[in-house]
Image (cartoon, rainbow, N blue to C red):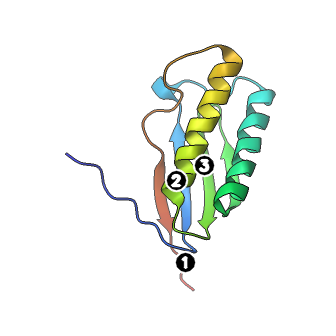
Amino acid sequence: MSRAWRIEYEGAYYHLLSRGNEGRDIYTDEKDRIIFLDTLGEVTERFDVDVHAYVLMSNHYHLLVRTRQANLKKAMHWFGTTYTQRSKHRHLRSGHLFLGRYKSLIVQNDA
């Protein structure tokens, strides 16, 4: 069975989340959280994405973002790959950090 298509358009709001592989933590200490947030900041500049809210749990994260361009897939691919590489390099690990691909839900408002 093929994957569902991701809907992308300019000005879209998304609730994004991703979990650690095998339920493992994706941050081991405060430095990891800083690296995660720094990498998220780079996404906003590189891909013109606005981050409106975030929650960092030990083994997953939630983001509320708005895309100014229809480029969510590119932005999240870069983000997931870059943070994973930085984390694995820092902790001398190999293998998957995240469980599959990120989840994205379009946020609709009544206005």
Label placed on residue 77: none
Label 1: state its secondary structure: loop
Amino acid under label 2?
Lys
Q: Which mark is residue 109?
A: 1
**Most extreme residue toward the bottom, as rendered?**
111
- Pick out the residue farthest to the front: 46
Q: Image point 64% across, 59% down: which residue? A: 47
Position above or below: 55 against 50: above
Q: CA distance from mark 2 to mark 3?
A: 18 Å
Q: Earlier in the sequence, mark 3 or mark 1?
A: 3
- For label 2, count other residues whose C-alpha is less than 10 Å away and answer few (under 14), some (14-19) or many (20+): few
Q: Position of residue 92 (x, y in %)?
A: 65, 13
Q: Which residue is mark 2?
A: 74
Amino acid residing under circle 3: His
Tell me the quadrant of the picture where the N terminus can be found.
top left
Query: 62 or 89, which is in the foreground?
Result: 89
Residue 107 drawn above or below residue 45: below
Q: Quadrant of residue 29?
A: top right
Q: Position of residue 17 (x, y in %)?
A: 54, 47
Mark 2 lies on a secondary structure that is helix
**Which residue is situated farthest in the left direction here?**
1
Q: Residue at x 48, y 45 (%)?
A: 102
Residue displayed at 49% across by 20% down: 95
**Disc 3: which residue:** 62
